[in-house]
Image (cartoon, rainbow, N blue to C red):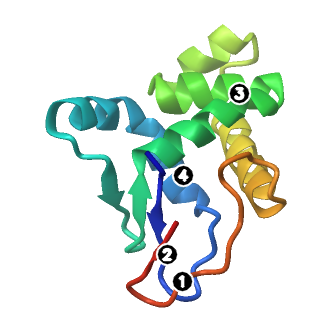
Amino acid sequence: MTATRQIKKGIPLTIPVRIFRELFRHLQAWKALCETEGKDTLTGPDGVEYCIYDIERLYQETSRLSPRQRQAIRLFLFENRPEREVARIMGVSEDNPVASYATQGLIRLNELIEAGQIEGYSPRAPAAEGQVAA
């Protein structure tokens, strides 16, 4: 199955970090919804449709991030653990804002997207409004 993402005119293929964060944070619930109800796309607050297969693919790409970024994304976003707990698991001070590691990782994933370095998820020109980019 080819994953697609509806792109509005002028919106880049990268994902705004605040939306990226929420997509990863709710990925497990979305997977369950996809399995039970077949809901494989969601419309973000930016009006863009996101496909679960694209987001799962991008989550797999966290293996290309630094260990701290990868761990913060997995524990803080994907597993939705409290920041202090994540800090303890990561072996850093509980006052350390581990969310910043996750944010840095999401920014790095967007850089990889822009550079065309994520296989099967390459930049393409935005489609005209209402058209679907394949």
Gap between marks 3 and 2, in whole Å?
27 Å
Figure quadrant of residue 42: bottom left
Residue 61 is marked as: none
Q: What amino acid type should be assigned to the residue bearing mark 2?
A: Ile
Return the residue nearer the eye: 114 or 38: 38
Q: Is residue 81 above or below residue 58?
A: above
* Mark earlier in primary sequence (1, 3): 3
Q: Is residue 97 visible?
A: no
Q: Residues within 10 Å of mark 4 (few under 14, many from 20)?
A: many
63 sits left or right of 19 in the view = right
Residue 43: image location, x then y, percent: 33, 63
Residue 70 is marked as: 3
Q: What amino acid type should be assigned to the residue bearing mark 3?
A: Arg
Residue occupied by mark 2: 7
Gap between marks 4 and 3, in whole Å?
14 Å
Residue occupied by mark 4: 20
Q: Residues within 10 Å of mark 1 (few under 14, many from 20)?
A: some
* Mark earlier in primary sequence (1, 4): 4
Return the residue nearer the eye: 96 or 37: 37
Instruction: Looking at this view, name the residue that lies furthest to the left.
Output: 37
Residue occupied by mark 1: 127
Gap between marks 1 and 3, in whole Å?
32 Å
Tell me the residue at 24%/46% (across/down).
39
Assess whether mark 2 and mark 1 are in contact (beta carbons under 8 angstroms). yes
* Mark earlier in primary sequence (4, 3): 4
Q: What amino acid type should be assigned to the residue bearing mark 4?
A: Phe
* Residue at disc 2, secondary structure: loop
